[in-house]
Amino acid sequence: MMRKRVIPCLLLQDRGLVKTVKFKNSKYVGDPVNAIRIFNEKEVDELVLLDIDASRLSRDPDYELIQEVAGECFMPICYGGGVKTLAQAEKIFALGIEKISLNTAALENIELIRQIANKFGSQSVVCSVDCKKSLFGKYTVYSHSGTRDTKLSPVEWVQKVEAAGAGEIFLNSIDRDGTQQGFDIQLIQSIVNAVHVPVIACGGAGSVADLFEPFERANVSAVAAGSFFVFHGKHKAVLISYPDLNAR
């Protein structure tokens, strides 16, 4: 049986590690390099590192921090945030990052996916898709760290980015982000059924059982979580950890 990928998703803001709830109210939870050292010790398979301010503020990636993080990390990293050109992607890959996640940049210029995939392979390009449900139950894609509603259908958008060369979809539910109330299985199923590339589901994990639900009910390739690996107990004390998934 193929091992299930359970990926910590780390959010960067002002060179610090933060956690959000529904993409708002970011709370500082520590130093990203220290967190990565802990995940090294836990022998985590993979990490996702997202700068949540870069695209929203039209800022370039923090290459110095990316280099520092890549130098400490023993596992593959997917980095996202502020990448708008092929040249920027080349620089980030040269620093030791294995995958680049595109979100706002892909919405503004889908050809960037094709350019990176043509040069580095589809496996190196992840398209991050942030979705939110309206009061009428309709899902749409959001850009700029969840601050702008593009009005695009998530299903139609993921099919377009797959055709452009994206090798993986990182699906984030804005409504479930940081709530620890479980994944939005309906949303996940719709995306998994729409594409042939692997889908990583993120947003809502609050228990080990939650982590396994998208595998069992939606056939995802992987799940990702943030709060579940950072906050513990009813008072949500900060303690970065990674569970023994074999003990389920």
Image (cartoon, rainbow, N blue to C red):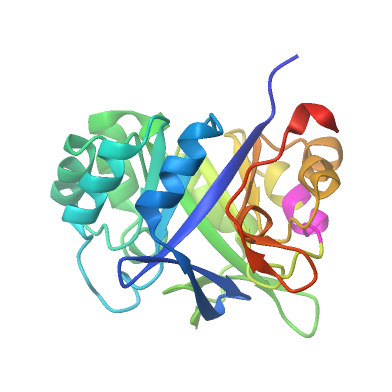
Magenta stretch: helix, strand or loop mostly: helix
187 part of magenta stretch: yes
Q: Which contiguous range is marked in magenta?
A: 182-189
The relative height of residue 117 versus residue 10 in the rendered view (above or below) is: above
Answer left or right for 209 relative to 224: right
Residue 219 seen in render: yes
186 part of magenta stretch: yes
Residue at x-position 81% and y-position 51%: 207
The relative height of residue 93 versus residue 136 in the rendered view (above or below) is: above
Answer left or right for 3 relative to 15: right
Residue 235 is situated, as x and y percent measured from the top left of the image, at 74, 74
Answer left or right for 201 relative to 235: left
Q: Quadrant of the C terminus?
A: top right
Residue 177 seen in render: no
Residue 102 is situated, as x and y percent measured from the top left of the image, at 38, 54
Q: Nearer the viewer, residue 117 or 1?
A: 1
Quarter of the view holding residue 71 = top left
Q: Quadrant of the N terminus?
A: top right
Residue 163 is situated, as x and y percent measured from the top left of the image, at 46, 41
Q: Nearer the viewer, residue 247 or 132?
A: 247
The relative height of residue 125 versus residue 123 in the rendered view (above or below) is: below
Count of picture labels: 0
The relative height of residue 56 versus residue 200 in the rendered view (above or below) is: below
Residue at x-position 53% and y-position 52%: 9
Q: Nearer the viewer, residue 145 or 9?
A: 9
